[in-house]
Amino acid sequence: MTNHWNDIKNSDVIMIIGSNAAENHPISFKWVTKAMNKGAKLIVVDPRYTRTAAKASIVAGKQLYSKLRSGTDIAFMLGMMKWAIANNRINWQYLRDCTNASFLVNSGFETCRVASSVPAGLGGGTKTGVFSGLVDDPRRQKKYKYDKATWAYQYADAPANTQPAVDSAYWGAPNSGDISSGPPGTSPHADSVWAKFVDQVSAYDIATVSSITGADSADILRIYDAYTSTYLDNKSACIMYAMGSTQHTYGSQNVRSYAMMQLLLGNAGVAGGGINALRGESNVQGSTDMCLLWHILPGYLAVTDNSWGKRDRAAYKAGYSGGRAPLDISSGGTDPVSLSWWKFGGKYLDSLLQAWWPIEHTGHANLDTAYGYLPKAHKDYWYTHE
């Protein structure tokens, strides 16, 4: 979730996919209504015609609603990306300066549009439909597993490998020059993220998307046109989704496709932009991300208590919530780029303290003082009334 629900009122276009927000998340839909009262368009994509779909905007006498077969969200979104590229509805400046589109990937990486080697146990030969690096691993049963050695960037500062190489001939120098009408180069480097991406979405023309999703071609075009209109700097759109998108074996990929669409249009990190997960605001989303329960601090951190082990900041960071693994590298972690959430909790705590009590000089002594401001729960009490 990239922005608060009340930011939806700033959106020019709202797409609700895999969600019946009007019935199941009515508070979120309150902000959709506020946006529509200011002229925003509502798009609804759902297998069922729900109460949310009934509120979809009308353009040229037709609602901005499309049914689709359950599980075909990715095809629908990739088709929109291809259409946006073909019609130059791309926020080029944002794409160059705020995404990895200009980065070069390993020359051995291939999208599933290119025939790649397939292990004998999976049929053998070279076939399309899989990415490079497919391996035969019986432990995965019928699921694909990949050797990701080629799934990496080329680096400009090898062997340190901290700065990905950039396709500067096509995109120009990062963060310099106006490319609002499109990159100055004639064609992208074949190894660039952008070239691979364009290749990946190339198959998803309107007819193909209609065939896969079951959606009417005219409905698809209306939605694509309305949504991609927000590529302009003075426009923004948000995507709202719920379990209709996530409760699939490839649910994460569904959401990734939404994020990719937003990056193409420059709709992330702007007022009224982003993607919004409509989870259970009174349970999952509320008790964690929004910290509505007494024992959770922002960042999924455990609340402090009055035990000796948590009365000071250093002990809290080291011992964290009764013996969990150390939180940050200085407390025992070894991998500086690990994705382990808990390992970096100590840093999240310090960021929280600085956000709540801004301190000009953020040395440990001042952060220790700020830690003292946090209320301490009694370690033997449970404050939830059940």
Image (cartoon, rainbow, N blue to C red):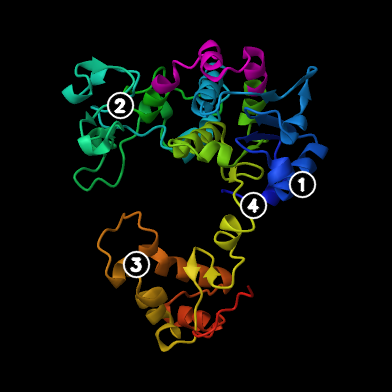
Instruction: Answer yes or no: is residue 368 visible.
Output: yes
The amino acid beneath tag 2 is Phe
The amino acid beneath tag 3 is Asp
Report the front residue among 29 and 177.
29
339, above or below 102, in the image? below
Residue lying farthest to the left in this orientation:
120
- Magenta segment, which residues? 198-223
Q: Are marks 1 and 3 in contact (CB under 8 Å)?
A: no
Identify the residue position indicated by label 1 in the image: 30
Task: Using the numbered discs, state the Cα–Cα distance from disc 3 to disc 4 in whole angstroms.
Answer: 28 Å
Residue drawn at point x = 82 percent, y = 39 percent: 37
Identify the residue position indicated by label 2 in the image: 131
The answer to whether residue 6 is left or right of residue 80 is right
The amino acid beneath tag 4 is His
Q: Is residue 203 magenta?
A: yes
Q: Earlier in the sequence, mark 3 or mark 2?
A: 2
Residue drawn at point x = 42 percent, y = 29 percent: 171
* Mark 4 or 2: the one toward you: 2
Q: Position of residue 381 (x, y in %)?
A: 54, 83
Secondary structure, mark 3, is loop
Q: Are marks 3 and 2 in contact (CB under 8 Å)?
A: no
The amino acid beneath tag 1 is Lys
Identify the residue position indicated by label 3 in the image: 328
Residue 4 disc label? 4
Q: Position of residue 12 (x, y in %)?
A: 71, 35
Label 1 crowd (10 A; few <14 / some 14-19 / many >=20): some
